[in-house]
Image (spheres, rainbow, N blue to C red):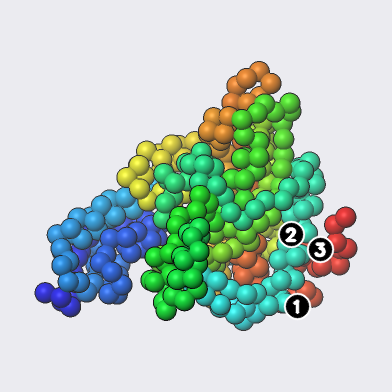
Amino acid sequence: MSGDMVTWRAPAPLAPSQRRTFEDLLPYCLPGDGGFSLEHTEPGATVRYLAKPGHSTEVTAGLLDEAHARAALETARPPHVLHEFDGPAGSGAPGSDATWVGTGLRVGGSELARLVRALDTVLLGLADEAGAAERLVPHLVSWETLRRTGYTRNFPQHLTTCAVVREDLRALDRFAGAPDPVAAAAELTPAPVALAPAVCMNLFAGLADGALPAPTVLTARGMCGRYEVGARAVATRLWSFDMRELVYVGNAAGARSFRDAMLDAVTDLARDVGLPSTLTTASDPFFTSERADLLGYQSALSLKHELRGQSADGSPAVAVTSVNLHRQHFGLEFGITLPDGTPAHSACVGFGLDRWAEWIHGHLGGDPDDWPEILRAAVRKPCRD
């Protein structure tokens, strides 16, 4: 009956590292926006939710069983590359320098802006050391590029697609006079673009269908968009966020060497910052039915590492940097070849500037005098030519 509270209990407990995945999958299993509660206990998770008119509890139970099974595929993390969780913690003011302006959207104040500028100055120095050429990238990405990256197949839960008003004069008038979003949406037509979920996508697209005369290292900074249904008001999981990436495209040995050099650089940077963090292998948030195969492939080859910063307020650690080895995936999908005609290998490192700033600001506040020397020096450094 509509409005009844329904209880579902997990068939087995989940490890702490598996619970985040299950929590992220939950909104895709439950009916509407009726609200739900989740409790993790020793016997296993318990979910309680309100039924909706026409709702089938059997269908929902099946979806919850499937979500639980996919979350349970997450394997235990191997030993840490870096473990600095015992480092000092400050008493800054996380989020005090920003204003929410919409779902997943924030305007940072002067303190966070200065932190991001200092961080990016440091990262531009890292890019210079790596011999990276700087590029400008759009914040939109074509549907064709999304398809070639595999994002539409592997991470549909993060996509934010775009629409435009239909090319019709009457449609323009109706849209302009629409009394609510539903009426306005009736005048829209899908656009062949989406918000870019990562900076590197457009960098690969810019190299597509051609041969590289030599290994290439590129860097770009851009705004990205990833939708997370369960994190609509979390400062470190924004819908729109700022990212700096460095990308290597070349041969297999060069890609692995670049990945290893970036792991060393990220380790050094984390130690210079001196806040609680850990660097370890990781896996991407594969939600679809191919999750088992994709997780197994990624984990077996240690293709992904994350630097996770522990927040000052004790909330779960958040990934601030990701280092990835792609093998020939993008070379094959984008038709990027080496002089001998073989598909190129690639690797990348991405720095979430908003997350870094929130992490540091939470511990140390917005006064540069309280920041580590590497950031104080960046504040004093003149703008890059």
Pointer 1 local density, CA inside 10 Å: few below 14, some 14–19, many at least 20: few
Secondary structure under the numbered disc 1 in the rendered image? loop
Disc 2 from disc 3: Cα separation: 9 Å
Residue 42 lies in quadrant: bottom left
In this rendered view, identify the residue nearer to me: 51 or 126: 51
What residue did someone put label 1 on? 367
Which quadrant does the C terminus fall into? bottom right
**Left or right: 316, with 350 as reference point:** left
Q: Residue 43: percent from the left, percent from the top? A: 23, 63
Q: State the residue in front, 351 or 332.
A: 332
Q: Amino acid at mark 2?
A: Asp
Provide the secondary structure element on which disc 2 rests.
Answer: helix
The correct choice, above or below, for 83 with respect to 344 in the image is below
Q: Mark 1: which amino acid?
A: Asp
Mark on residue 120?
2
Q: Which residue is mark 3?
A: 378
Residue under the image location 44 percent in, 50 percent down: 155
User: Is residue 330 left or right of 97 when viewed as pictured?
Assistant: left
Marks 1 and 3: in contact by CB < 8 Å? no
The residue under label 3 is which amino acid type? Ala
First in sequence, mark 2 or 3: give its number.
2
Kindly state the secondary structure of the residue where label 3 is placed. Answer: helix
